[in-house]
Amino acid sequence: MPEGHTIHRIAKDHTPLLVGRPVEVSSPQGRFAADAAVVNGHVLERIEAYGKHLFYWWANGVVGHVHLGLFGKFRVHRGAGPHEPLGQVRMRLATELATVDLAGPTDCTIGTSDDRDAIVARLGPDPLRRDAKPKVAIERIASSRQAIGALLLDQRVLAGVGNVYRAEALFVHGIHPVRAGRDCELSELQALWTTIVSMLRQGVKDNRIVTLDRREFDIPADGRPRRGDTTYVYHRDTCLRCGTPVATVALAGRPCYFCPTCQPR
């Protein structure tokens, strides 16, 4: 499932192609046809990212909602078109600049601003948003008996963090993923938030996940790490820093990667 940086990057990339223009909205697959008719031809005012959710604000007061889930994917066709749909396209957004096709999402619906607010109310703060309140996430973690590795994947605690950023942020701070949230120092949780913000912002900038400290490995600011050397522990056989075999523990239904040496229990 795409992590939060991908969702924010999608909103950023699609905005100049779609926002401020009348948009032809259709559903080549047919499943979104009724909803598409409600917003077809209207001006799209903005695209909002919150955690792993996208919201499309239309000039007629309608707010669209997209959650990519595990299989959702956007495809952008540059130019006015027409462009032949590739695969099962649930929603098509077309302007004179580009055609944006969405296939395979978990959710693609229209509603109201109240519907949008109800979705956001169920989520924790999004580290990539200017209006994020880190204190809310930190307090939820600090008051919980649950493993911090599980809490970081709970979208009610923190919106937008997925399996990669969970493992890598905990590694950076030497926190074992099974440690209870309430057993973490407040200073650790504040530093963890700062690291997650930094990692996600870098992900938006690079349009890929690179979590290692470039200074530690002498990587130029505008350079790319070697293939396979973009994370410290996630999906690695050995820790990039110390060489210890990487271990995993199942938390929140996903394997959480960690280094037994750098993250002692």
Image (cartoon, rainbow, N blue to C red):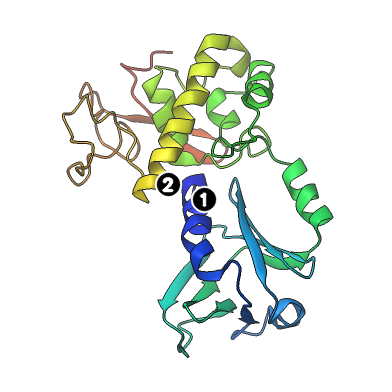
Q: Would you say 257 lies left or right of 190 here?
A: left
Relative image position of residue 59 (x, y in whole percent): 74, 68
Q: Is residue 193 left or right of residue 248?
A: right
3D distance between C-alphas at marks 1 and 2: 7 Å
Number of marks in the rendered image:
2
Q: In the rendered image of this protein, does residue 211 appear above or below residue 118?
A: above
Q: Is residue 249 visible?
A: no
Where disc 1 sits, the SS reads helix
User: Farthest residue in the right direction?
Assistant: 114
Describe residue 108's horizontal placement relative to residue 97 as left or right.
right
Q: Considering only order in the chain, which callout, 2 or 1, is on the residue closer to the N terminus?
A: 1
In the picture shown, does residue 249 fall above or below 47? above
Residue 50 position within the rendered picture, expressed as x and y whole percent measured from the top left: 62, 47
**In terms of secondary structure, where does tag 2 sit?**
helix
- Front residue of 117 and 175: 117
Specify whether residue 159 is in view. yes
Query: Considering only vertical position in the picture, is 254 above or below 148?
Result: below
Amino acid type, callout 2:
Val
Q: Which residue is mark 1?
A: 8
Relative to 130, say whether 216 is above or below: above
Q: Residue at x 33, y 23 (%)?
A: 259
Measured from the top left, where is residue 130 in percent x and y? Answer: 59, 36
Please tell me in which quadrant of the rendered image residue 216 appears: top left
- Callout 1, which amino acid? His
User: Residue 204 has which mark?
Assistant: 2
Crowding around mark 1 (Cα neighbors within 10 Å: few <14, some 14 to 19, many 20+) is many
User: Measured from the top left, where is residue 162 in percent x and y?
Assistant: 50, 41
Q: Residue at x 45, y 88 (%)?
A: 81
Q: Residues within 10 Å of mark 2 (few under 14, many from 20)?
A: some
Q: Between residues 72 and 80, which one lies in front from this camera angle?
A: 80
- Tell me if label 1 and label 2 are in contact, CB under 8 Å: yes
